[in-house]
Each structure stands twice: as C-alpha cells, then as structure tokens.
Image (spheres, grey):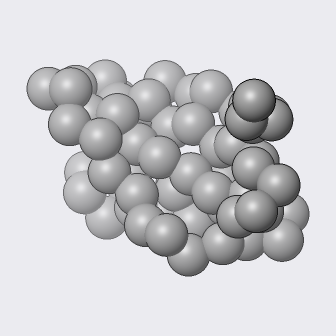
Amino acid sequence: MSQIKVDTVESINGSVLIVFYTPGKCWQFRIVSSTGGIFGETKIYYTAEAARRTGLEWLRDEG
C-alpha cells in the first residue's frame, strides 16, 4: 500500500496546485489545469515549501 501524504491543495486562477510526499520520491508537486491536464516534473524537493514555491512559479509563468 502506497503511503502518500498530501500537504497542500490550492486553487489559483482556475488551476489546482497539489504538493505531496511519497517515501521514495520525497516532496513533489502537480498542477491540474482548468482543462483537466496534469503537469509536474519528476524532480524531488526535500521540503513541502520548496515544492510549493516551485509549483507557484510554474503557475505564475503560465499565467
């Protein structure tokens, strides 16, 4: 059974930012766009805040 921990779910300008932790991959983020597309990268972050900041930068750059 996978032990995923969700830290953050934020709605920003119609998109949703999700920050989560998995034991093998540390902290990551995904963005669900207003059209349902899912975006992110396989890069890992050692804190939830670092993943959140990068996700917010992605959203800002796309806006």
Q: Is residue 27 visible?
A: yes
Q: Is residue 49 left or right of residue 20?
A: right
Q: Is residue 21 left or right of residue 44?
A: right
Q: How many marks?
A: 0
Q: Quadrant of residue 62?
A: bottom left
The picture places residue 42, in percent across and down from the top left corner, at 49, 69
As drawn, which residue projects farthest toward the front? 1
Q: Is residue 56 left or right of residue 50?
A: left
The foreground one among 38 and 9 is 38
As drawn, which residue projects farthest toward the left? 35
Q: Is residue 53 visible?
A: no
Residue sitting at 14 percent across and 26 percent down?
35
In this rendering, is residue 29 above or below 25?
Answer: above
Q: Quadrant of residue 6?
A: top right
The picture places residue 5, in percent across and down from the top left corner, at 80, 34
Residue sitting at 34 percent across and 34 percent down?
32
Residue sitting at 82 percent across and 55 percent down?
23
As drawn, which residue projects farthest toward the bottom? 43
In this rendering, is residue 61 above or below 20?
Answer: below
In this rendering, is residue 37 above or below 63?
Answer: above
Residue sitting at 76 percent across and 48 percent down?
21
The foreground one among 56 and 6 is 6
Where is the N terminus found, in terms of image quarters?
A: top right
